[in-house]
Image (cartoon, rainbow, N blue to C red):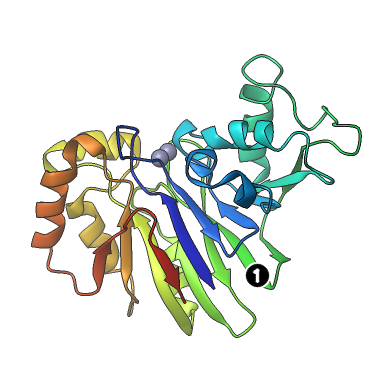
Amino acid sequence: MKIRILGGDGGVAPGCHTPSFLLDKKILIDAGSAAANLSLEDQKEIDYIFISHSHLDHVKDICFLVDNMFTFRKKPIELISSPEVLESLKQHIFNDKIWPDFSALSNGRSPILSYRPVTDSVELEGYQIQLVPVSHTVPAVGFLIKDQAGVSIIVTGDTGPTEEIWTVANREKKLKAIFTEIAFPNHLQSVADAACHYTPRSFSKEVLKLAKYPPFYIYHLKPEFRKELGREIKALKIPKLKLLKLNQRYTF
Ligand SMILES: [Zn+2]
Ligand SMILES: [Zn+2]
């Protein structure tokens, strides 16, 4: 299982790109920066985009990716998420006002987008991918991604304090990584709580919900607090905790 980090920041600024992970060649997990950071040749390979939630920092590059691919596609790119998340995208982005309805627009061979609502899990490209509800200000899911050998990773997406995904993590026998977020520094705890994000302090309480854990890869740091967050996260002294690196490739 190969993961390439196309974006892992909690905002847009020079050198900062919002979340998007490439799984092998055909699958994106979120699409905050997939058009900006993937070559056009690599964009042609994408067949599936799993979406954690409807917030713009996680979905904006779907717009530009499908636009780039309009003349090339022979079948639609599938957007996969919970029914609520997909409904938001249909209603508020691909509505022929903010951006064209690419599920209706055809290039003569095929529409460019299709929607696959999933309430539990889906199997494709040799993976079983389970959608697990997390706690955010809008309907949101994290993902348990498992290969045929049972090796798994978790990507939580945006979340504040939550339960189910840690229960799922505790059941996994070959969990190799947890990609999760920290967005705000400790002095903005009330903002983080209202926005359903972690601070280093609230994240450290989440870790206690895990019986044992693999390396954590932390992402979604707000660019304006990067240095402060770096210091606070280091001070937690949680073993096996790393900050996600942009353009890094990980193999599990
Ligand atoms: Zn969000
Ligand atoms: Zn976000």
**Picture residue at 25% right of the left edge, 56% below the top:** 203
At horizontal 15% and vertical 52% (from top left) the residue drawn is: 230
* Left or right placement of residue 30 versus residue 136 in this view: right
Tell me the crowding category of disc 1: few under 14, some 14 to 19, or many 20 or more residues within 10 angstroms, Cα based. Answer: some
- Quadrant position of ligand 1: top left
Q: In which quarter of the image is the N terminus?
A: bottom right
Locate residue 104 relative to residue 59 in the image: left or right: right
Residue 65: x and y in percent read: 62, 37
In the image, residue 196 above or below residue 214: above
Q: Nearer the viewer, residue 232 or 196?
A: 232
Compared with 218, 183 (above or below) is: above
When the figure is inspected, residue 65 is found, relative to residue 180, above or below; the finding is: above
Q: In which quarter of the image is residue 212?
A: bottom left
Q: Residue at x 46, y 74 (%)?
A: 251
The residue that appears at 27% across and 66% down in the rendered structure is 207
Q: Give the camera-side residue of 82 and 3.
A: 3
Is 182 left, or right, of 234 in this rendering?
right
Q: Position of residue 7 (x, y in %)?
A: 41, 47
In the depicted structure, whether residue 164 falls above or below residue 159: below
Quick check: 10 left or right of 40?
A: left
Where is mark 1, residue-wise?
128
Is residue 180 at all visible to an observer of this figure?
yes
What is the x, y in percent for residue 96? Answer: 71, 17
Q: Three-letter amino acid code at disc 1?
A: Gln
Disc 1 residue: CB within 8 Å of ligand 1: no
Residue nearer the viewer, 110 or 220 = 110
Image location of residue 100, percent across then percent down: 71, 22
- In which quadrant of the rendered view does residue 250 lie? bottom left
